[in-house]
Image (cartoon, rainbow, N blue to C red):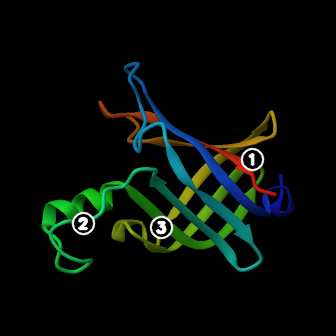
Amino acid sequence: MNKSDISGRWEIVSWEQIYDDGRVVYPMGHHLRGFIEYGPYGMFCIIAKVDRQGFTTGGQWSASDSEKAAAYSSYLTYSGGYEVEGDVIVHQVEHSLFPNWEGSSQRRIAKFQDGLLHLSARLEADTSEARHAILTWRKMA
C-alpha cells in the first residue's frame, strides 16, 4: 500500500469497537456522517452523529456545560501529516478536538475489501476495556 492507494476523500460507513469480552459498541451510533481525506498537504478526519442536538441554553460559548459535553461526545475531528508503512497508516496528529491526541501518532492498520477501506486500531490492550476499533470508509467520487 502507498499514498496513492488512499489518496482522496473517503466517506464514513461505520465505526464499531469490538471488545475482548464480546461486547460490540458503536461510539456514535449506527448513523454517522463525515469523511477522512488524504491529500498532498496531510490528512483530515471528521466524524459526527447524524442527529446531533442543537444548543437550547445559549450559543457556542454560553450553552450549558452539559450541552457542550454532549456536542463534544457527538463529534470527532483531527488533522495532520500521515505516512504509509506497509499496511499501516500513521496519522501524525497536529490538531484535534481531543487535546491529548495533539503531538501523537495514531497508527491504523489498513485493509481494502469489497471496494471499502477498513482502518483498525487496538485500544487499551491488557485492560478490561481492551478492544479493536474498526472504521470503514467508502471512496467518494
Q: Position of residue 22 (x, y in %)?
A: 41, 19
| Disc 1: which residue | 87
Q: Quadrant of residue 102?
A: bottom left
Residue type beneath disc 1: Asp
Instruction: Please identify, in this view, whether the residue under mark 2 or under mark 3 is nearer the observer.
Output: 2
Disc with the residue nearer the chain's start (1 vs 3): 1
Q: Nearer the viewer, residue 87 or 66?
A: 66
Residue type beneath disc 2: Phe
Q: Quadrant of residue 120?
A: top right
Q: Position of residue 122 (x, y in %)?
A: 50, 40
Residue type beneath disc 3: Ser
* Residue 70 visible, this angle: yes
Query: What label sits on residue 55 in the rendered view?
Result: 2
Q: Residues within 10 Å of mark 2 (few under 14, many from 20)?
A: some
Question: What distance separates the C-alpha of mark 1 from that of mark 2?
Answer: 41 Å
Question: What distance separates the C-alpha of mark 1 from that of mark 3?
Answer: 19 Å
- 99 on left or right of 83: left
Quick check: marks 2 and 3 in contact, CB under 8 Å?
no
Residue shown at 49%/41% (left/top)? 31
Query: What label sits on residue 48 in the rendered view?
Result: none
| Disc 3: which residue | 104
Residue shown at 83%/58% (left/top)? 2
Q: Nearer the viewer, residue 49 or 129?
A: 49
- 120 on left or right of 122: right
- For the C terminus, give its image quadrant: bottom right
